[in-house]
Amino acid sequence: MKRRFWGIATALAVTAALATACSSAQGSPSASSNVELHQLTIAAVPAADSAGLYIAAQDGLFAAQGIHVNIEPAISSETVIGQQLAGKYAITSGNYVSYMLANVKQHAQFEILAAGSIMQPQVQELMIAPGSPIRSVDDLRGKTIALNAFNGIAQLLVSATLSANMLSPSQVHFTTINFPDMAQALKEHKVAAAFMPQPFATNAEDAVGAEPLTDLDQGAVTSLPISGYVVTKSWLQKYPKTAAAFRKALVEAQRIADTDPGAVEKAMVQYSHVSATAAAIMASPQFPLDTDQVLIQRVADLMQEFGLLKQRYNVSPMIP
């Protein structure tokens, strides 16, 4: 399977540059000491899509804006939405699908503070066990596929791929398994296939010899926006300076993530707890600097097409 590789010399140079930048950023005075909140608790799914957040924390970019962040890992966006609405989390990083559903079904009024990721080849994949009799998407008919959560980006992407291969999502069985447990579930043949983003897909290859069945970056969902950094409308209205400071640091980190593979590797090792080898060879998503309403509307339209929404959802109120 083809991944992205970088030379040892480049990696060493990047590491040195990161160390210098991190030291400089953490040692600089706060640029936004007038933010309303100096402590933020943030939940994030520890996938490559959240690399910008991790880099901003590692490199002291939040600290330079007068913000200290405590990042807690999330199983999925869906699992932390209730806690965010209850005030436990100021900001969460996760897939757009779950927040749109919360806005529709719970009248949650979530807004996208900053864009997180756009899918690229080999970043979201369906994985199978080594030696599996499943050799094509068509072989999944009647089989069980693991997702990290129902009614999220995983279900949307897998449904799109099944449909592109003339299978209805109703012709397979979906079950939920946490990302760190999927490799073992494949090895024990508890499921026929598992949806895995990076770095979990590459880590499963290293850990149990899992194999990619298909890349989900294809057809109707090619280059689909996957995740963003989301707040409630009421939180944004109450803490506008904090929101602006967070966004400034995050955008700077997104720029680093999109141009510096070494920074992404370092973030994945620390926050996703994968091996340095897996982090070094995994594929990465695109890290956008702007929140593009047209692109994000694609997500909502596909949700309607594949039955996650009953009617068209206009995303414009989510983009302040």
Image (tube, grey):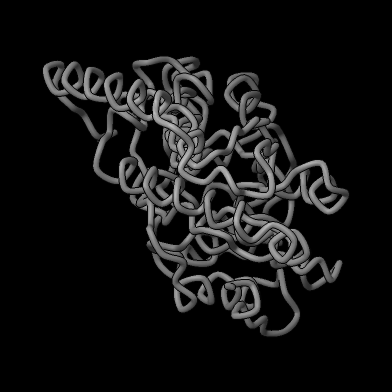
Indicate the position of residue 308 as horizontal and vertical percent values. Answer: 71, 69
Taking the image as shown, residue 247 lies to the left or right of residue 120, namely right
Q: How many marks?
A: 0
Q: Nearer the viewer, residue 220 or 45?
A: 45
Indicate the position of residue 52 as horizontal and vertical percent values. Answer: 44, 42
Q: Is residue 212 visible?
A: yes
> Which residue occupies 35% across, 51% down?
286
Indicate the position of residue 258 as horizontal and vertical percent values. Answer: 30, 46
> Which residue occupies 38% across, 57% down?
288
Taking the image as shown, residue 51 lies to the left or right of residue 156, namely left
Q: Is residue 127 visible?
A: no
The answer to which image quadrant residue 76 occupies is top right
Taking the image as shown, residue 279 lies to the left or right of residue 116, namely left
Quick check: 36 above or below 134? below
Q: Nearer the viewer, residue 259 or 118?
A: 259
Quick check: 100 above or below 64? below
The answer to which image quadrant residue 205 occupies is top left
Q: Quadrant of the C terminus?
A: bottom right
Indicate the position of residue 259 as horizontal and vertical percent values. Answer: 24, 43
Q: Nearer the viewer, residue 55 or 210?
A: 55
Taking the image as shown, residue 95 lies to the left or right of residue 206, namely right
Q: Quadrant of the N terminus?
A: top left
> Which residue occupies 72% across, 66% down?
237
